[in-house]
Image (spheres, helix red, strand yellow):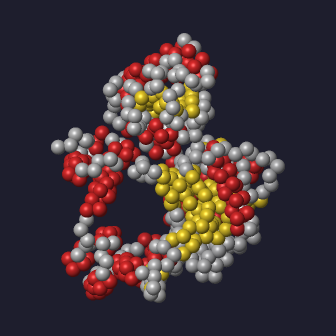
Amino acid sequence: MTDFDPGDYEISELGPAIKDIDDLGELEEILQAEHRGQNRAPAIALIESRIEKFSEDDDEPADADEMDLASMSTAEVGNALQSVEEVSDLESLLEREEAGEDRDSVKRLIRSRIDSVKGSDEEDTEIEVDDRPPEERHPDLDHPTRDKRHVRSLHGGTYRDMWVYCETQAGELVDVSKEMLGKARELMDTYNDDYTTDERVVAVLIGSDVSKHVEDVIAYGADVVVVREDARLERFQHKPYTEIFCDMARAGATHENFEVRGGRDEPWRDYDKPRYVLFPATNNGRDLSALVQAELDSGLASDCSGLYITEEVISNPVKTGVAGEKKEFQRVLHMKRPDFSGFEYSTILCIDNPTREFHPQGASVIPGSFDLPEPDAEREGLVVEHDAPLDDDWFRVTVTDFDQLDEGIDLTGHDVIVAVGRGIGDDPTKGIELALDLAGQFEDAEVGVTRGIVTGSFNFDGHVEQYTHEDRQIGETGQVVAPKLYVAAGISGAVQHKVGMDESDTIVAVNTDPDARIRDFSDYFIEGDLFEVLPRLTTALKEGRFEAAVASDGGTAPTGTPDDGAAEDDRGESR
């Protein structure tokens, strides 16, 4: 019977916690414990993934004769095919699928496996592509495209420029809009050099009285600003904002088969859709990005923290159209985001299919992921006023009254952040008190918390509860900070949290676990109990001994650390 309780872990922490468990029976027990407990779908997927990874080396080769294709999903068929080595068995499976379910996706997988087993001596097999519209392929279904017939994926369309949705809140341009403009400027400058072209950064402003930001967005990197002013747009609304953005993106299409609602000439542009588009990963930005990309018949990578453009070689026959053949895709936006498992980052690509193209390639960007650019007041740009008629039906929902919520705490810009995680579990209230005491020794410091504190079931006394709310959360779904000093107490170091503090000048971690992931990216690691370490650091600061130690050459352990040799820098050397 295992003592491991998956309910003790957040999703981001569960992956690292089970990665070293190599007992199949124990993993099965953990899986059943999750089913009996919180029964979280993402947690179940993580545990099942670990079970599959651990047991894959012990799997017996699949017996083609015993494979029941009709009861298997496409993914299950794909996994099983990897252990079928005989061409004759694969051909038999193909015949059975054609005579049974006759799924194109499964047939492509089997043909691809046949090509792989045969090797590259034979000619490539052309993939059979059904390019009929969904209404014809699925006459028995009430297909969603019936409700948005004006949306049509293109083949051979023309795409240019990187568009940036510049969000405003309470009449002000939010910082993430400036960050995205600076990153877009950097990307497109490199892009134009690499591809010898002159594509632009296009800023989009939608709202009431947003024209006052035109000069700012140009100064931050935009070549073109498309503006829509209307008093009814003072507050964000899904329907009108989506319709306006999509109309901006589709207007002026030149593709002869491109169907747009109300298409018209736009002399400033000569392409069907933007090549790339960026949105802020704010509450409103997340909503708008998903709606716009769906309406533009493309894809979206959400909550990204890294972007770059380069070529990519793909062998997936769904993308190349030919089994066993590799194809190089040009000008692909690589959208980097923290992996769901917490192990690493994933890079999302939006790659075209043989008979359709996915543009714009879109991403939403986590605030604080990129540096704020220095504005250049000398820059000049083109201003385009969007004047297409607005449908009154888009404004059927109106806000009649609202309360202004507390803006919360802005942790960015402080010299010092003291952050605590689930390691305060033995005495949650005291853990927060110790963090406040330590932060109080600095002139410009604040206290932050991990998502585990915000979503956990800890009981805090009333006088510290305000420091445990979501507005102080640091990480992928919280704030991104870059202080001169970041003290991480009782924090394991999941990649989602790393995103929020990795740019700090100096990171000091306190943890009882010498193998905690945060050690890998800390400048100083103190192996010890935060309930013992934090008070000693606070005392050293009060007595002025900490500053003296920091100002020294670092040959000895700073006064106030638990023991000589307990504090190590990121090279593993005692400090």
Which quadrant is home to the N terminus? top left
**Residue 248 in view of the camera:** yes
**Residue sitting farthest toward the right:** 378
Which residue: 29% across, 56% down? 54
Which residue: 74% across, 68% down? 196
Q: How many marks?
A: 0
Could you tell me residue 177's position as x and y percent? 63, 49
**Residue sitting farthest toward the left:** 1
Could you tell me residue 557's position as x and y percent? 52, 22
Is 411 above or below relative to 342? above
Which of these two is toward me, 20 or 183? Answer: 20
Could you tell me residue 292's position as x and y percent? 54, 62
Is 94 above or below relative to 511? below
Which residue: 27% across, 46% down? 38
Which of these two is toward me, 361 or 86? Answer: 86
Which of these two is toward me, 363 or 211? Answer: 363
Which quadrant of the view contains residue 444? top right
Which of these two is toward me, 513 or 193? Answer: 513
Q: Is residue 25 left or right of residue 231?
A: left
Which residue: 48% across, 56% down? 346
Q: Is residue 397 left or right of residue 204?
A: left
Could you tell me residue 289's position as x and y percent? 54, 57
Is 554 above or below relative to 522? above
**Residue 247 in view of the camera:** no
**Residue sitting farthest toward the top:** 543
